Image (cartoon, helix red, strand yellow):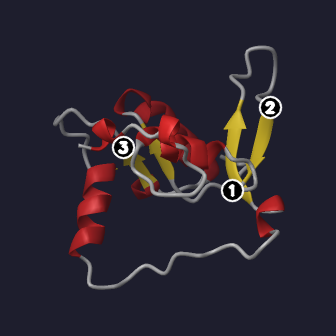
Amino acid sequence: MRATSASVVITHPESLSVALSASRATKLPADRIILFNVDGASYGAQTTVQNVIDEGLASTSTFQERVLQPGEGKTKVAFLNFSSGTTGKPKVWILEYRHDVFSRVACMSGCCDTPLCTDSQRYPARCS
């Protein structure tokens, strides 16, 4: 969390105690921890991904998507992936937007309509 200057953490309920401990150590407010894959149980004051979605859908404000300018994807970080740190401090690799991993994931989900998707990469049945 220090390495990324995280302002929000999304975690599984089974990892909540670790996330709360890390948030205290980095002074990230506990209300910035969001839970996904919640099974209906109560987790105190923690909000869930579904709560965030519902709040967004109920909001009258609109979101303006930021569109990268040509060539900007070569310099913008899209994703940070950390190793487990089993042999020392966790290492991080950076994936920029220019990498086509995200478009491929979207294609495989079948929930996109992009020229990068070929017919063999679309799986519309997964979007029901």
Q: Say whether residue 78 is left or right of residue 93.
A: left
Find numbered disc 1 in the image and state the secondary structure of the residue it sits on.
loop
Find numbered disc 3 in the image and state the secondary structure of the residue it sits on.
strand
Amino acid under disc 2: Lys
Q: Earlier in the sequence, mark 3 or mark 2?
A: 3
Quote the CA–CA distance across marks 3 and 1: 19 Å
User: Residue 122 in the image: x percent, y percent?
Assistant: 44, 40
Label 2 neighbour load within 10 Å: few <14, some 14-19, many 20+: few
| The C terminus - image quarter | top left
Quote the CA–CA distance across marks 2 and 1: 16 Å
Q: Spot the residue most to the left.
A: 40
User: Residue 46 in the image: x percent, y percent?
Assistant: 31, 49
Q: Earlier in the sequence, mark 2 or mark 1?
A: 1
Residue appearing at x 26%, y 84% in the figure: 60
Residue holding disc 2: 91
User: Residue 62 in the image: x percent, y percent?
Assistant: 37, 83
Find numbered disc 2 in the image and state the secondary structure of the residue it sits on.
loop
Residue appearing at x 30%, y 70% in the figure: 56
Residue holding disc 1: 5
Occupied quadrant, residue 13: top left
**Is 69 in front, or is 118?**
118
Q: Is residue 99 above or below residue 31?
A: above
Q: Which mark is residue 35?
A: 3
